[in-house]
Each structure stands twice: as C-alpha cells, then as structure tokens.
Image (cartoon, helix red, strand yellow):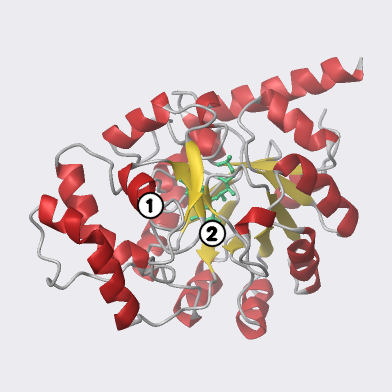
C-alpha cells in the first residue's frame, strides 16, 4: 500500500507516479504508454502550436481512458536584443565556419512561447484533468480560467519560498524540483543556481511549508528513489530522465546513445543551450562555451543561434549542439517500454516500502 494516497485520490491514477513532461523529446506515444502503465501522463506543450497540441490530445484520448496533464511554460517573454544576438553569433562564429553555415542567414526563432490566451482557450476546450506549469504560474486572469475549466493546477518549486508562493497563488499541487533534475530549472523567484537545494533536502522542507500535496522530482529513477520520496513526506513522484530511453520517446539515436553512456557525473547545469539554466549531459558547446556563459542571450533566444549548428551536426550523427537534457540519475534509466517501466517502478517502490516497514 502507498503510505500517502492524496495524489492517487486527486488524479485518479493507479500509481502516484507522474511521467514528467519533456518538451522536444516526447509526444502522445510516451504519454499513452505511461498512462497505460498506471502513471499520470504529461504532454509537454511549450514547443507546440495550439493545433498540434489539440491533435496530440485527441490521439491520447482515442487510445487510453486516463487523466491527462497538459504542461506549459510561463516565463516572462523577453524581446530579442540585437546587441546580445550579435555577441552570441560572434561567440559561435568558429562553429558556423566549421559547419559551413552563413551566420547572416535568417533563422526561424526559437519556439518556446509562454502560456497565453490562445493556449488558455485550448485548455478551456479540452478540459484536461490537470495542467502543470514550469517557471511559476500564469497571471491571475489566465489561471482563473484554467481553474474554472475544472483543471487541477501544479507547478514546480525549486525552493521553499517558491513552494509557498505557488500555494498562495492557487497551485493545487507543488512539484518540489531538486537540483538533480534533468531539464530546465523551474526557478522563478531566484536566478542563483548555486543556491538550488537537492531533492533530499528540498522535499521535507517543502512538505513542512505547504498544505497541498507535494510531488518529489529530481534524481528519482527506481523503486529506492520513489520509496525515499515517500519517506521524506512526498505524496508522489515526477520522473523524467528514467523514461528517456523508452522506445516510445522521441530521443534521436545519437542522443539515445549519449544517454546510454552517461554516468553519475556526466550532467551539468548550463545556460548556453537556451539562455536559462537547465541540466543535461555535457556536449561540445556546453564544454567549450559554457557550461555558464554571460554571452548567451535570454531564454529562449540562445537556442536560435544554435539551431543551424544543431541541424548541421545532427545530419552527421553528432549531438554537439543538441539538448541532452537529463538528470543526475541518468545511469539508472532503462531501455524498456514505458508501460512496463511504470509498473516495474511502482512494484519496486511498493516492495521497498513494505521491506522498510518490517
Ligand atoms: C529531457 C527533459 C525535458 C524536460 N522538459 C520539461 C518541460 O517541457 N516542462 C517541464 O515542466 N519540465 C520539464 N523537464 C523537467 C521535469 O519536469 C522534471 O523536473 C525532471 O525530469 C525530474 O528530474 P529527473 O529528470 O531526474 O527525473 C524536463 C526534463 C527532462 C529530462
């Protein structure tokens, strides 16, 4: 038995496990497989148009009868700064030369838009059971419309202060994202990455500070990690990295092999890929330009200058400029269908919890 059923009761899923939304590396297929295995499937919408998101939700609803979580970014949009773009292009100039790319050629802008009126209309139309946000919460009128549609709202907190802020501003669930986590840091009240607590320290302090259920995220990749999260007071877990090597993910082959070879010390937090701190397996541009660079334009514009290099390198089977977002437990990831993995994770966690209770 799960020691805490608050999340299972709220989500009406078989297990208190959330498949993390992972923009750019997954779509409906992974959501469906994880949901069929008993987890809450999350569809990342940050890089999708409203039409594409609708299409994906329709696919999911045709194939599985389960609650669904739609995930959005809600950062403050920052206009392109031509001066910073020029500095960035200058910094990347040797790579443009190496790959025979024209630095003056126009590039389609990075497509990571914050949650807006159009996406809110989509939420009102589709009425997903859950909506999750990264980088805080949208403004009160938009959030009010999401909640009026009957959706439960969750968002990531990377500090106790952010967790309290989320609860005070209407979150029904707080995701405590420790420093081990793969992908973007959900931080929104601080920009000091050096201060970000790890999952083991963050979760119990967040649990003490808020009344809403807390989901632990970051570095959880097997039954031991899930049992530990419950021991720390979490009502559930959100797992991303451990699902990346499932056949249903959309991770490209060379990235899949980089993830397969990664160890406990292979990931770092970098701002060079998008302009915002995120954890991933070190690639060439992170190593040579970062991992943290003052030259990187604000989120998401750093990604724009890298786009032609990413495309050219990927054609050669290289991930030198590709986001390899992954957390510190990447080595524990397994190549296994996501439904099977979900059941294995839940089974191992329950076995570990009952062993600990003896
Ligand atoms: C490849 C990848 C992409 C991610 N993209 C998103 C995203 O689009 N939205 C979001 O809320 N979180 C995103 N995250 C962060 C996850 O929600 C979560 O915090 C993280 O996966 C938990 O740590 P773990 O990777 O160690 O399991 C991403 C994580 C990874 C690994």
Q: Is residue 9 visible?
A: no
Q: Which mark sits nearer the N-terminus, 2 or 1?
A: 1
State whether label 1 is within 8 Å of ligand 1.
Answer: yes
Picture coordinates of residue 77, whole percent (x, y): 47, 78
Element type at mark 1:
loop
**Vertical relation: 291 (above or below) 124:** above
Quick one: quadrant of the C terminus? top right
Q: Is residue 98 left or right of residue 128?
A: left
**Residue toward you, 26 or 288:** 288
The answer to whether any part of residue 206 appears in the image is yes
On screen, residue 241 above or below 176: above
Residue 33 rendering spot, x and y as whole percentages: 48, 36
Distance (Cα) linking label 2 and label 1: 14 Å
Residue 198 x %, y %: 70, 44
Tell me the residue that label 2 is attached to.
70
**Residue under the point 53% across and 44% down:** 182
Q: Give the left or right position of residue 300, taking residue 231 as reference.
A: left
Q: Name the foreground residue: 82 vs 5.
A: 82
Q: Which mark is residue 24?
A: 1
Which-is-in-front pick, marks 2 and 1? 1
Label 1: how many residues lie within 10 Å, few (<14), some (14-19) or many (20+)? some
């Amino acid at each position: 038995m799960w020691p805490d059923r608050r999340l299972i009761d709220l989500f009406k899923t078989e297990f208190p496990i959330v498949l993390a939304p992972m923009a750019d590396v997954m779509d409906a297929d992974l959501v469906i497989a994880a949901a069929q295995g008993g987890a809450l499937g999350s569809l990342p919408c940050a890089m999708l148009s409203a039409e594409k998101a609708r299409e994906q939700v329709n696919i999911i609803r045709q194939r599985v009868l389960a609650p669904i979580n739609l995930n959005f970014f809600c950062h403050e949009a920052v206009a392109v700064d031509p001066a910073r773009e020029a500095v960035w292009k200058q910094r990347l100039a040797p790579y443009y030369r190496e790959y025979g790319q024209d630095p003056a050629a126009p590039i389609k802008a990075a497509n990571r838009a914050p949650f807006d009126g159009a996406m809110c209309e989509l939420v009102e139309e589709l009425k997903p059971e859950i909506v999750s946000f990264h980088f805080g919460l949208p403004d009160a009128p938009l959030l009010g419309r999401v909640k009026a549609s009957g959706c439960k709202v969750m968002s990531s907190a990377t500090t106790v202060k952010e967790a309290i802020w989320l609860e005070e501003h209407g979150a029904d669930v707080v995701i405590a994202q420790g420093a081990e986590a793969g992908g973007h840091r959900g931080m929104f009240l601080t920009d000091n990455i050096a201060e970000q607590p790890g999952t083991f320290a963050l979760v119990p302090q967040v649990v003490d500070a808020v009344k809403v259920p807390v989901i632990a995220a970051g570095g959880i990749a097997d039954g031991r990690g899930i049992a530990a999260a419950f021991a720390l007071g979490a009502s559930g877990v959100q797992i991303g990295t451990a699902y990346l090597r499932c056949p249903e993910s959309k991770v490209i082959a060379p990235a899949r092999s980089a993830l397969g070879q990664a160890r406990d010390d292979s990931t770092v937090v970098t701002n060079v890929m998008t302009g915002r701190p995120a954890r991933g397996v070190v690639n060439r541009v992170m190593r040579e330009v970062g991992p943290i660079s003052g030259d990187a334009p604000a989120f998401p514009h750093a990604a724009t200058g890298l786009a032609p290099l990413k495309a050219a390198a990927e054609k050669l089977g290289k991930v030198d400029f590709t986001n390899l977002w992954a957390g510190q437990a990447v080595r524990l990831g397994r190549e296994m269908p996501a439904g099977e993995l979900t059941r294995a994770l839940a089974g191992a966690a329950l076995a570990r919890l009952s062993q600990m209770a003896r």
